[in-house]
Image: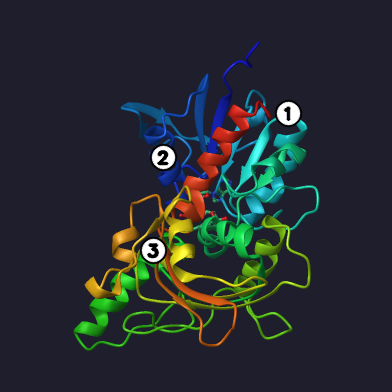
Amino acid sequence: MTKALPNIAVLGATGVVGREILKILDENNVQYNSIKFLASKRSAGSTLEFKGQKYTVIETTPEAFDDVNICLASAGGETSKKYAPIAASKGCVFIDNSSAFRMDEDVPLVIAGVNDEDLRKHHGIIANPNCSTSQLMLPLKALDDKYKVKRMIVSTYQAVSGAGLKAINELTDNTKTNLVGMPYEPSAFKYEIAFNVIPQIDVFCENGYTKEEMKVTNETRKILHFDENVKISCTAVRVPVYIGHSEAVSVEFENDVDVNEARELLKNTDGVEVRDDVSTYTYPTPKDAAGKNPVYVGRMRKSIAFDKGLDFFCVADNLRIGAALNTVRIAQKVIEMELY
Ligand SMILES: NC(=O)c1ccc[n+]([C@@H]2O[C@H](COP(=O)([O-])OP(=O)(O)OC[C@H]3O[C@@H](n4cnc5c(N)ncnc54)[C@H](OP(=O)(O)O)[C@@H]3O)[C@@H](O)[C@H]2O)c1
């Protein structure tokens, strides 16, 4: 007998990621018995529209999870730390977008289509990886299956929407102010983001890397089940782009790589779209990726730094594959695999 359809809650429904989750739940036609939208006291009572119907936003309280089977959460780490254990204790599967539980041993960290079997090990909480890690997993898993990753160096060019609504508004205000020659005092970023790039995302760790950079190292290892021998180094940089993270990736493999074969492999990988023909200047940019679901790959070439190496450029909508889309896809897998 198939399980009854779940009661769903979207926590943080009024935020940048939350709104994207609503769009994708609709686009993907996710089936449910009931749905409700949770946020903080600030937006409780306001209305939002979903599938042509108006819903009242509900304040998040422990009782709000009483009848919920699956919660899609993007309301920040502190909110998740407070409510995920409560929700899980009430039998709800809490799919979390924050970094609060990603590295916990009993919490699966999942990219749908990459390590779905890990979902079976959940104890009520499932984590969605950081946006810069997420977009890399689909192409990297396919390449690893064939050539076996040995070492990887990633440089990111990350859009401001990755830092929420305040950062989006700051790029607009900062740009307008600069264009009329007025001084600007940044607050979402350490330095002015307009006409600039900032080589710091999140705080610095003792080893000189930022937390964002270490997330790429640690989360990639956890998702692809790499051991400590696979070396990964990342430099994460914020750029004045609204939507779409880009990544320059250099990978060294255990096995020889043929670039044409690797291109064909990625052309046949679900969720990846190859745009790679330098003779026609075909390669992906963030403007192509914004609002779309695929992870775009281009500029594929044999490395001249590593003998068995490949370089490529990878672009995706950070609000989609990097957050909302993967959250919704995980919820769909949880429903399909009857893990709620
Ligand atoms: N932006 C990205 O690309 C991205 C990518 C991956 C993961 N994430 C993660 O997703 C989360 C949300 O990011 P965002 O960019 O969507 O932020 P945002 O635009 O600031 O939205 C935050 C949401 O959380 C709600 N919220 C805040 N405090 C709450 C509380 N105490 N109780 C209940 N709800 C509360 C807010 O509700 P109100 O309307 O009531 O304030 C709002 O709906 C963060 O954990 C972030 O790290 C973001």
Q: CA distance from mark 1 to mark 3?
A: 35 Å
Residue highlighted by disc 3: 244
Residue plotted at (67% across, 86% down): 208
Q: Which mark is residue 228?
A: none
Residue plotted at (49% across, 82% down): 190
Q: Is residue 328 above or below residue 258?
A: above
Q: Secondary structure at mark 3?
A: loop
- Expressed as whole percent of the image width and height from the top left, the position of residue 259 reads 47, 70
**Which residue type carries mark 2?**
Ile
**Circle 1/circle 3 CB separation < 8 Å:** no
- Expressed as whole percent of the image width and height from the top left, the position of residue 273 reads 39, 55
**Which residue type carries mark 3?**
Gly
How many residues crowd mark 2 within 10 Å: few (<14), some (14–19), many (20+)? many
In front: 30, or 176? Answer: 30
In front: 204, or 259? Answer: 259
- Quick one: label 3 or label 2, which is nearer the N terminus? 2
* Image-quadrant location for residue 245: bottom left
How many residues crowd mark 3 within 10 Å: few (<14), some (14–19), many (20+)? many
- Expressed as whole percent of the image width and height from the top left, the position of residue 284 reads 33, 66
Q: Is residue 219 above or below residue 89?
A: below
**Circle 2/circle 1 CB separation < 8 Å:** no
Residue highlighted by disc 1: 91
Residue 135 vs residue 110: left or right?
left
Q: Is residue 171 above or below residue 98?
A: below
- Quick one: label 2 or label 1, which is nearer the N terminus? 2
Q: CA distance from mark 3 to mark 2?
A: 17 Å
In front: 280, or 138? Answer: 280
Residue highlighted by disc 2: 24
Q: Nearer the viewer, mark 1 or mark 3?
A: 3
- Quick one: label 1 or label 3, which is nearer the N terminus? 1
**Circle 3/circle 2 CB separation < 8 Å:** no
